[in-house]
Amino acid sequence: MDGFTATQKKILRNHARAIVHMRKRLADFKFSLVFGAGVSADFKIPDWDTLIRDIANDYKVRGGKILDNNEKRPHTSKAQVLFHHFAAKLCRQKGKDKLSLGEIKNEWRKIVRKHLYKNKGAVDTTDDYFGHPYLSAFMSIINKCPMTITYNFDDYIEQILQKQSTDRRIYETIWDPQLQTKLTKCVIYHPNGFLPRNEMERQSEGLVFCEDEFADQLIESMAGRYASLLHHYSQNTCLFIGLSLDDATLKHLLRQSAKLNPGHYHYYVVYQADGQNIPQSEKDVIFEANFNLYNLVTLFLNSEEIKELGYLIDLSNDMFVHKAGIDSLNLMYCYYVVGAIGIGKSTAISYFRNLFTHDEWPDFRIPELGKDWETLSSTQKRRVDIWIAEQFRKKNDVLCDDPKSLMGLHIIDRAPLDPIAFTKKAERPQKASFLLNKIHENGKGFKIRKGHVILLYGDSEILEERAKTGGKSYNANKLMKMQDDLKRIYKAQDGMSLIYTKNKKLEQVIKEVGRVIHRKDYKELNLHMRITNIEKGKYKC
């Protein structure tokens, strides 16, 4: 059986971490697709400029001149002017001074629908996907996701799902953020309103089309009306396709989500047309802006690559692992977060629950852990050594042998070499030998899993304060020495990242950890070789 296609291998070379992460989230029922106007454009839905111009030229509106006079206004403002022009014209036609807003909006929706679906060639095709270049790769994912969000009015996703269903509706369409859903998956949510092609289908009473509607939506989001959508963005990993990030409400919700859960990241596709060459410097600027503001990891892809991305996310585990083996592709990314007691590593890691998270100790802690190592009796030290080594063995076994864990992003609290920093220099080779034999089970078990080490270090006085708050009796000098020892024990140029925490808020530290995981080139440190060399006295740490 063949491996991945050339396009798939290219995507995996550039975005393997993103793909294995999205695959995990899909398996966890915590993945969601978010579509924008760029997706509907491939259904031959008119863009903003064309739609507004078509509405202005409609014989029931006749607002071409007004549109020309307001050419420099934003799209939403143009739509607002046209709507008021149409309302006044409708009143005159009916010979009334005033009509109800509901009556005006009903007539307005008819005009919008007429021009939204004007390209009948796209609608009448026998193709199950209406000739869309990549949506076929995502329909299976839509069926598996708890909710798919589309900021478009059209019902093409629903039409495709209807074609694929047999005798009953397999999806649910909603547009009110305060409504509960009947289904647990395949829910299609239209935050900006819903205007199906078939007038007999239920539709939203309003459309977020004019400037006042966009402004009201933003105000309502600030007032909490869209709390359910904010919760969705905060709890699920989303892939954004076809969006330009011009929607003020969307940006507000993403920024809120990033502030509430700084370790939670989404993926955002920037469409790159065939033959278009975006300079790397420009890509870097776009990536950093989206990453810093909205916790978005940006992927630059063309239509074919977007399609293959969908297939890669949805490919069965057995097939994915098999093809990756043929092409010798790495599917597992391990990040060991280390640091002195009180540095805040466990707190930082707690914000990355959307990854495979491995806590510091799999078992309940024993009382001796809270005491200064030098104050323990020899019997207590032996008990602590055995217990700690057993904890690292359990974590290492999961990283090496658990089928559910062999693909994805792993963040691990502490690495197996940490106990060496608690040991006097003369005793470190012996401690390394002890740890190695316990974790590796005297050569019969798994070697220590390679990974990238993220070392957090900071101010000694703050470390002491935090340690004492946590019930651990370590003074500033000992904690600073522990910190320096850890740097020497894990010293490596490519396989380690240093993050200085002094004068940084927790959110900033989490952001830097996130940047290492989602942005920095992945380089591994061979921990098994390193502890073996410490055992042999080759590393003077």
Image: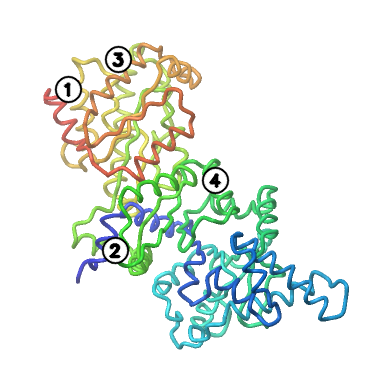
- Whether 238 is drawn above or below 376: the answer is below
Instruction: From the viewer's perspective, tell me whether residue 230 is left or right of residue 536.
Output: right
According to the picture, the residue beneath numbered tag 4 turns out to be: 255
Contact (Cβ within 8 Å) of mark 4 with mark 3: no
Residue type, label 2: Phe
Quick one: label 2 or label 3, which is nearer the N terminus? 2
Measure the C-alpha gap from mark 1 to mark 3.
18 Å
Residue 459 spot, x, y in % from top left: 41, 18
Contact (Cβ within 8 Å) of mark 2 with mark 4: no
Query: Which of labels 4 and 3 is toward the front?
Result: 4
Measure the C-alpha gap from mark 4 to mark 1.
49 Å
Residue 162 spot, x, y in % from top left: 54, 80
Query: Which of labels 2 and 3 is toward the front?
Result: 2
Instruction: From the viewer's perspective, tell me whether residue 23 is left or right of residue 389.
Output: right
Q: Image point 69% across, 64% down: which residue?
A: 80
- Name the disc covering residue 346, or none: none
Quick one: label 1 or label 3, which is nearer the N terminus? 3
According to the picture, the residue beneath numbered tag 1 turns out to be: 429
Measure the C-alpha gap from mark 2 to mark 4.
34 Å
Q: Image point 15% across, 31% down: which residue?
A: 532
According to the picture, the residue beneath numbered tag 3 turns out to be: 378
- Name the disc covering residue 320, or none: 2
Instruction: From the viewer's perspective, tell me whether residue 252 is left or right of residue 448.
Output: right
Residue 173 placement: quadrant:
bottom right
Residue type, label 4: Arg
